[in-house]
Image: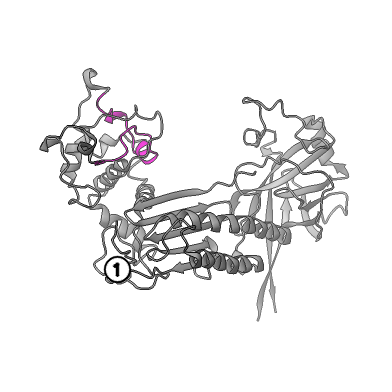
């Protein structure tokens, strides 16, 4: 007996119209370019295998050649020293973790410290600096059943709970009872940027400091790391940068404290916790909090000194090491750039890779949606009197070009209902990021445009105008318990037995 599976999309509408695909079509609108206003988030379902697309292959080859040409010039115009700089770049889809990446490139400096690797590759180890803050934040999320972001920091750090605020010193002392775990993680605690930020002030004419005011630990790797007691003894003497929860201010010290929160919650050293909960579970066998005992994999430089697409980024720098990570949720894509030597290469290569691949991946996502969803859907019970036609055009998302229900033109009814005073009404479907094995939800957005492509019902163009107000109109009209703009595609799986 042979079992085979067949899947095809079925569009289920909020008005309980059950539709089946009967044909495919793609539309090129004759209207001028339009400033669409989709909700923040993806406008197509993320591509599941972008690395297999021919345009991605071609772009990867061209990107490798472009970076190689940049390295070959080595004439000072590039802005970094190619002879002492090693770097690794990798872009991949979360759906292809075990297969080929979208793009990968490694460059090995011609001069490297002999105690480390002499060839940069996918197993090489770099120091990542402040990108490690994402590890701390992730661990706090893992521990969410024990520690909440709204918890006061004094609940988990006894050294800060012991500080009592008085009316006389509230300007010069941090209001620790008002600082939460979340405000530290979001750089909103109002504390100073660095635990210790040394500078040779006496060379500029400042008077010499007393020995009790001079740091003896933790100074840029030139001194021993400070202990927990030494950290709080010095740090709690500092005045706040702002009142808590008022304005963001970058702070390394905030994440030192969050590390102590993790130790307070778990009763175990920070290093042990993240290596078990994160590195171990993700099979990150070469990743560690401290310097690895085995340095053979380390990249050690000589002398170690229009539409909104959200990019979640974190950069890091430590001596001659530079790092940059990018998460692009709209496409389920991640980018990592690591460098050792002249870290200016990180920004240069990151820009090159993002500028090249983001538009291509968007096009791949659109092509995937065209293949999967574009077509004419009709009810098996009412011939062509109930149907919907999905196409794509020059704008984002899936376009509803025709929608009939029992012979009624629903697009015209929508236009009448919303009172859109324009010559052109456009309905687009955008993914809601709600999926199951057999369904994907979409949100319909109706915009009214005039013939010149402008949004006809937007009032003015000043500070208080509403050029893109999609987000507060979602699910604004409800029939029964179903939003008039709520749709989802359902895949029907048929099992054939032979």
Q: Dot 1 lies on which element?
A: loop
Image quadrant holding the N terminus, namely bottom right
Quadrant in which the C terminus appears: bottom right
Q: Residue furthest front?
A: 75
Query: What residue is at 19 percent from the left and 39 percent from the top?
Result: 232
The image position of residue 357, as x and y in percent, is 59, 59
Q: Position of residue 254 (x, y in %)?
A: 31, 40
Other-residue count near label 1 (Cα within 10 Å), few / some / many at <14 / 14–19 / ≥20? some
Percent x, y of residue 293: 24, 67
Give 137 or 190, whichever is nearer the viewer: 190
| Residue 280 visible in image | yes
Above or below — where is 185 with respect to 440?
above
Q: Which of the two residues, 490 or 418, is positioned nearer the viewer here? A: 418
**Residue 314 lies within the magenta run:** no
**Name of the residue lying farthest toward the left:** 211
Can you see residue 49? no
Relative horizontal placement of residue 354, taking residue 458 as reference (left or right): left
Residue 84: image location, x then y, percent: 37, 64
| Image quadrant in which you'd find residue 448 | top right
Residue 181 is inside the magenta segment:
yes
Residue drawn at (11%, 38%) of the image:
211
Quarter-wise, where is residue 473 in the image? top right
Q: Which SS type dominates the magenta stretch?
A: loop
Q: Which residues are magenta?
A: 172-199
What residue is rendered at 63% in x and 24% in y? 464
Give the residue number, with chain letter if any, for mark 1.
113
Residue 485 falls left or right of residue 218? right
Q: Residue furthest bottom?
A: 1
Side (left or right) of 299 relative to 308: left
Position of residue 323 in the picture relative to residue 263 (left or right): right
State the count of labels. 1
């Amino acid at each position: 007996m042979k079992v085979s599976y067949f899947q095809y999309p079925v569009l289920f509408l909020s008005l309980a119209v059950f539709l089946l695909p009967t044909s495919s079509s793609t539309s090129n609108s004759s209207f001028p370019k339009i400033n669409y206003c989709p909700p923040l988030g993806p406008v197509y379902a993320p591509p599941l295998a972008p690395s297999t697309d021919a345009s991605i292959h071609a772009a990867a080859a061209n990107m490798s050649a472009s970076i190689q040409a940049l390295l070959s010039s080595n004439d000072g115009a590039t802005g970094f020293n190619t002879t002492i700089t090693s770097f690794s770049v990798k872009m991949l889809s979360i759906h292809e973790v075990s297969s080929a990446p979208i793009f990968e490139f490694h460059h090995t400096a011609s001069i490297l410290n002999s105690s480390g690797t002499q060839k940069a590759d996918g197993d090489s180890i770099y120091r990542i600096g402040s990108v490690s803050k994402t590890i701390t934040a992730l661990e706090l999320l893992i521990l969410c059943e024990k520690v909440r972001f709204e918890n006061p920091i004094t609940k988990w750090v006894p050294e800060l709970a012991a500080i009592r605020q008085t009316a006389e010193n509230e300007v010069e002392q941090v209001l620790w009872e008002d600082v939460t775990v979340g405000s530290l993680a979001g750089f909103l605690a109002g504390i100073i940027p660095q635990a210790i930020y040394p500078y040779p002030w006496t060379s500029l004419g400042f008077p010499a400091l007393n020995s009790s005011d001079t740091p003896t630990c933790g100074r840029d790797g030139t001194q021993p790391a400070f202990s927990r007691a030494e950290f709080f003894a010095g740090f709690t003497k500092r005045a706040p940068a702002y009142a808590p929860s008022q304005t963001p201010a970058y702070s390394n010290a905030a994440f030192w404290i969050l590390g102590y929160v993790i130790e307070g919650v778990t009763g175990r050293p920070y290093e042990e916790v993240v290596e078990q909960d994160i590195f171990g579970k993700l099979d990150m066998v070469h990743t560690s909090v401290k310097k690895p005992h085995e340095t053979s994999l380390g990249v050690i430089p000589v002398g170690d000194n229009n539409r909104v697409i959200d990019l979640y980024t974190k950069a890091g720098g430590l001596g001659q090491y530079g790092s940059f990570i990018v998460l692009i949720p709209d496409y389920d894509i991640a980018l990592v750039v690591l460098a050792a030597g002249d870290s200016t290469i990180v920004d240069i290569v990151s820009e090159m890779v993002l500028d090249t691949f983001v538009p291509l991946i968007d096009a791949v996502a659109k092509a995937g949606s065209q293949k999967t969803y574009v077509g004419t859907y009709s009810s098996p019970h009412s011939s062509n009197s109930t149907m919907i036609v999905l196409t794509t055009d020059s704008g984002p998302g899936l376009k509803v070009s025709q929608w009939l229900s029992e012979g009624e033109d629903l697009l015209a009814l929508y236009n009448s209902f919303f009172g859109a005073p324009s010559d052109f009404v456009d309905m687009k479907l955008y993914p809601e990021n709600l999926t199951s094995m057999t369904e994907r939800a979409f949100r319909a957005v109706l915009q009214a445009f005039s013939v010149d492509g402008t949004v006809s019902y937007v009032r003015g163009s000043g500070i208080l105008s509403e050029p893109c107000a999609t987000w507060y109109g979602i699910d604004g009209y409800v029939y029964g318990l179903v939003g008039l703009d709520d749709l989802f595609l359902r895949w029907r799986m048929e099992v054939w037995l032979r």
